[in-house]
Amino acid sequence: MIDIAELLLLGISDQQEVEKEFYKHCYCQSGALSQHALISKQMLNARYSSLFPDAEDVATPVSFKKDKPQLTPEILAEAISNHPIALVGDVGVGKSSFLKHLMYVSAFAEFQHAIYAYVDLGRKGALWNDVPALVLEQIETALIEKHDIDITEATFVRSVYKKDIRRFDRSIYGEAKEANHRLYQEKLFGLLSEKQSSKAEHLRNCIDYLSRERRKQVIVAVDNADQRSITVQQEAFIIAQNLAAEWKATVFISVRPRTFFISKRSGALSAYPHRIFTIAPPRIDEVIDRRLRFAKDIAEGKLHLQRLQGISFKLGNMATLIKVLLESIDRSDDVKLFLENITGGNVRLLIEFLASMFGNPNVDLQGVIIGLEQSQRYFVPVHDFWKVALRGNYNYFDPEKVTAANLFAVQTDDAREHFLLPLILALLDESAPRRTAEGFVDYSVLKDELQSLGYRPAVIDATLRMANNKKLIESPERITFEEDEDGAYGFVPRAFRINTIGAYHLKTWMTSVTYMDAMVVDTPIFEENTAEELRRTIRSMKLSDRYQRAVRFRDYLTNVWIASGMTPSYFDWDAFCGQGQHTFDSVHASISRRAH
């Protein structure tokens, strides 16, 4: 079940037999703002503006008109100006999907009349250390597979170098063409062999010939460079610039914001002109609907996939479960709110999460099938989605194995630190003069405020690094800190802002019964009686025991908050507890029903 779900949801875009249909039916426009985001639309609109503070940096968001990206005129303009086109976007927002959709759907006519090569520096190029060689290899492969052009074929080579052959014929060896034909052929063979000795130069000459003689535009997409090291990404920029300038090709290169920021100021991008387009995340609810419907069509046999032949029984169950998920998401605003915010606009993470729902031990999907047979109606509640996010495939929360973060984790033996991360998130979420229009708060402002509450600078920095690496907050540079056994380390950026993942942790999860029960196993308890009481049932999975653990843990945190004496205007623990009370009431009611 898990393997089938991964194929239908995660690996389906890589299946050549349905690739074109996938991008036709599943691609969603970037930049559309959802009504379920827990941070302001102004902050969402300004997600990339901090990357381009200089006047010479002009970034154009990819826009759409009648489902066609307004990029095709720019392609022609950039082809003339010989500048590479940088597609800047966060991890998983759909940079690769944009390129594939451009090729298969929105600019299909343009690509049909072009010589096009898609260079994948990610999965396909993971084992290559020589990036230029990889790029040349994939361009040559694209010519053979997509255009039936073999750059080593004798007739083609003679056509590419016909000017050189004519010049050769006027040389002293050309004069021997009739008198000593064998000598002529040997010298001509040597000339053409030398022309092909440099693969890069030979391939460039071939592309130039095809462009001139066949009047075709040359388009090269260098994709997934952002899955490689900074060094490889810098090298990819230089290659992209060379292809655009020397090969007269239209070149796309996909870039993460952090890589662009670093390279613009100190690396490869600083030396070259470029045109920038930003790729913002699509609407998550549209992504879910299209992806699940496409997967359901394959499971129901409406679309053919050779790898799924012979497992029709499992596919029938899979189609049923996908239908249940679709209806559950469509019916519940709570589920939409969760999926929209906890994935932070990362479509890849979203699809991975949905695939993990199938076969997960914390979700009884076999019971769903039985329930459907009995009642013909079943919906997966939001707390089942929560359990997968908080526990993964395990019974207990493990911060190393799930994307969820423990807001109550501590760095030292100071119980007040249970609230340091919630205070940081609340401070970043506060609409106040100290927050910029883009949502950033200066590091110095954060530090001064938290020190005034009694927190030590080293602990503040450690917590900020942890929150950043858990994707609860982000910096303008989109950095990720290095980590070792002692935690994250490195220079702290100049500012931070909360993102949707942090906002969901703070506003929805933090005081819910499901989250509190999950965090008990990962949080040091500094009050011995409470710790002893929680230890007695810590391994019990009974609903009543889990409820009592969450209640006791909440009471403990409340006592710590009261004892701290803190009263910041932007954080009210009692109010947060009130917002999560309905989840406790719901579980308590369920326990009461079972008791009777």
Image (cartoon, grey):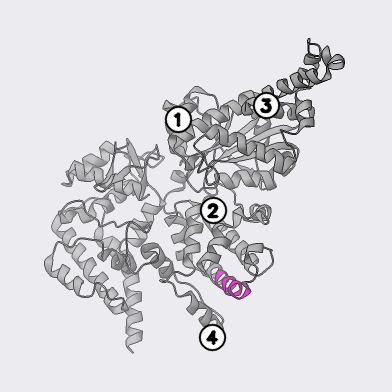
- Residue beneath label 1, please? 263
Question: Which circle's residue, 3 or 4, is located before the other in the chain?
Answer: 3
- Residue contact between numbered discs 2 and 1, judged by CB atoms under 8 Å: no
Task: Give 68 or 239, whichever is nearer the viewer.
Answer: 239
- The amino acid beneath tag 3 is Gln
Which secondary structure lies at badge 4?
helix
Q: Quadrant of the C terminus?
A: bottom left
**Is residue 586 left or right of 379 when viewed as pictured?**
left
Which secondary structure lies at badge 2?
loop
Quarter where residue 172 is shown: top right
Which secondary structure lies at badge 3?
helix
Residue at 22 percent of width and 56 percent of height: 418
Question: Which circle's residue, 2 or 1, is located before the other in the chain?
Answer: 1
Cα distance in 3D space between marks 1 and 3:
34 Å
Question: Which circle's residue, 2 or 3, is located before the other in the chain?
Answer: 3
Return the mark for residue 196. 3
Question: Which circle's residue, 1 or 3, is located before the other in the chain?
Answer: 3
Residue 13 visible (yes or no) = yes
Label 2 crowd (10 A; few <14 / some 14-19 / many >=20): many
Question: Does residue 527 show up magenta in the picture?
Answer: no
- The amino acid beneath tag 2 is Arg
Task: Give 188 or 525, whichever is nearer the viewer.
Answer: 188
- Residue beneath label 2, please? 283
Q: Which residues are magenta?
A: 312-322
Cα distance in 3D space between marks 3 and 4:
71 Å
Residue 252 visible (yes or no) = no
- The amino acid beneath tag 1 is Ser
Residue at 47 percent of width and 54 percent of height: 349
Cα distance in 3D space between marks 4 and 1:
60 Å
- Residue beneath label 4, please? 374
- Residue contact between numbered discs 2 and 4, judged by CB atoms under 8 Å: no
Label 3 crowd (10 A; few <14 / some 14-19 / many >=20): some
